[in-house]
Image (cartoon, coloured by chain):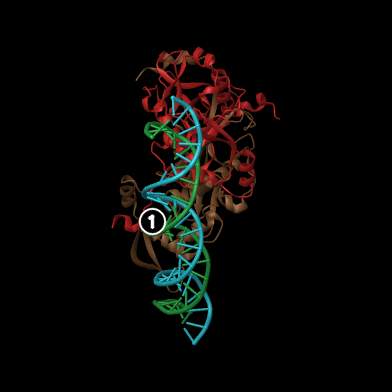
Chain colours: A red, B brown, C green, D cyan
Amino acid sequence: MIKQSNQEKFYQEHDRHYVAVDCIIFGFDGNSLKLLIQKRKFEPELNAFSLMGGFVKNEESAMDAANRILLQLTGLADVYLEQLYCFTNVNRDSAARTISIAYFALINIYQSNKLLVENHGAFWVDLNHCPKLIFDHDAMVQLALQRLRLKFITEPIAFNLLSNEFTLPNLQILYEAVYNRAFDKRLFRRCFLGTGLLINLNVKDMSGSKKGAFLYQFDHAKYVQLYNIGLYFNLPIDKQPRMKVDKFK
Amino acid sequence: MIKQSNQEKFYQEHDRHYVAVDCIIFGFDGNSLKLLIQKRKFEPELNAFSLMGGFVKNEESAMDAANRILLQLTGLADVYLEQLYCFTNVNRDSAARTISIAYFALINIYQSNKLLVENHGAFWVDLNHCPKLIFDHDAMVQLALQRLRLKFITEPIAFNLLSNEFTLPNLQILYEAVYNRAFDKRLFRRCFLGTGLLINLNVKDMSGSKKGAFLYQFDHAKYVQLYNIGLYFNLPIDKQPRMKVDKFK
DNA sequence: ACAAAAGTGTTGTGCGTACACCCATGC
DNA sequence: GCATGGGTGTACGCACAACACTTTTGT
């Protein structure tokens, strides 16, 4: 490793910038999608609503910073976390030129530490009833939602929002919340069970109905195995209509 | 607009970082995909091969910076340019902690200004015969290629690599270069012509064969119009096999 | 016995795939 | 007249979409 102080001189003429990470943290309460937001604790925009965020330090990557923020806030490590986009408009932050790397996270609401969340002035809001957020944070949330919809049919990440054990109705309600529309029960089950990635635990969850619904687990090992032999997770749901000559003749 | 100098104090305790943009610039010479790279003109790694890049200045967004670099290098404005990913590993640059926002660009090789390109020590290499690049630039190229493959079936961006007028064989060779595999001629034509987005100019390009091939134009206006009524460009080519129970029984 | 949610199968159709031959022209 | 690349149509199979009734059990 080259001593950095030696070489730093090469770049000295260039500008340096504040680099923040902002986290779009999604949760699911069994009925609807939730977003974790906070009342900002520092100026500018003190007490306005904002995403959870912080500044990237010299000795950490942006991913490290996002993980640090998530841990401080929810007590959770090993959270599903993915870089969304880097926002760099010159005036996006009213205090100083700051670029922000947005990350989106999927967590299980009930595994997060309520005390930590509250101590940070954070709280869950329903995605459909989200107050105005500061700066460009609303745009970040919209972009994250788009990405979430793309990912949900392309990768089995929904399970990060559910408990380890879940029922098929649970899963369907989650997908319906994400795509904001209903799916046919039979189609939905077929396409999930058809992947062979759900393990039926042969135990019923009686909380949702009188009949009870079977509990399942996601078979992560099998997923990785199949992925490595060139098979991909891809649900045939919510397909958008294609441009076709006869569609608009 | 709030005077920035007033508010800057709120962030003073935080670290500031060099922010670079690196451009993965794709071109197409009629046969294979090309990448524009340069011999680095400054330390560290002087004369090593690298992507075209530069630092983000205080008064410009990262997108502005990428456009500036592209203009300086190729003489082209209004280039297809898309943010790829933000690379932030602490030691990715051997000289100093620098985060890099990677952009990928699609340009028409023959519209670029050869003189400018050469004066920057830049040159086109075949994607399949690309030398080792500095830092994490190889990873950037790989990621860009993945993204390109995703985008080519999802958005009609291939035309940025072709002249305004092109033949269907031209287009097919381009897709075959991107996906690195052959497509059935009839299928390929059907799925493109089926979109209704290609205008047959009823003029033949005689350069490629004795019979000649019809020239087409991409109907951008119609594309936007159809997009706005909820129809999407989506080619049914190079579909990856899905995880299905019976596929591995 | 009834309410409430879980679970299950079949059929049609449209789309994607596979595949081989004729066409136009320059030389 | 022949070589070269451009252009075209059909038949099959599968996968997706649509759709309604039975099961279980708590009250």
In this view, the residue in front, B3 or C13, is C13
At mark 1, the secondary structure is loop
- Residue C18 rendering spot, x and y as whole percentages: 53, 66
Above or below, B15 against A79 in this view is: above
In this view, the residue in front, B71 or B85, is B85
Above or below, B4 against B144 in this view is: above
- Residue A164 rendering spot, x and y as whole percentages: 58, 31
* In the image: residue A116, left or right of residue A245: right
Above or below, A33 against C21 in this view is: above
**Residue at numbered disc 1:** B164
In this view, the residue in front, B139 or A219, is A219
- Residue B125 rendering spot, x and y as whole percentages: 57, 52
Q: Chain of mark 1?
A: B
Residue at 34% x, 47% y is B227
Quarter of the rendering occupied by the N terminus of chain A: top right
Asked if residue A248 shows in the view, the reply is yes
Q: Amino acid at mark 1?
A: Asn
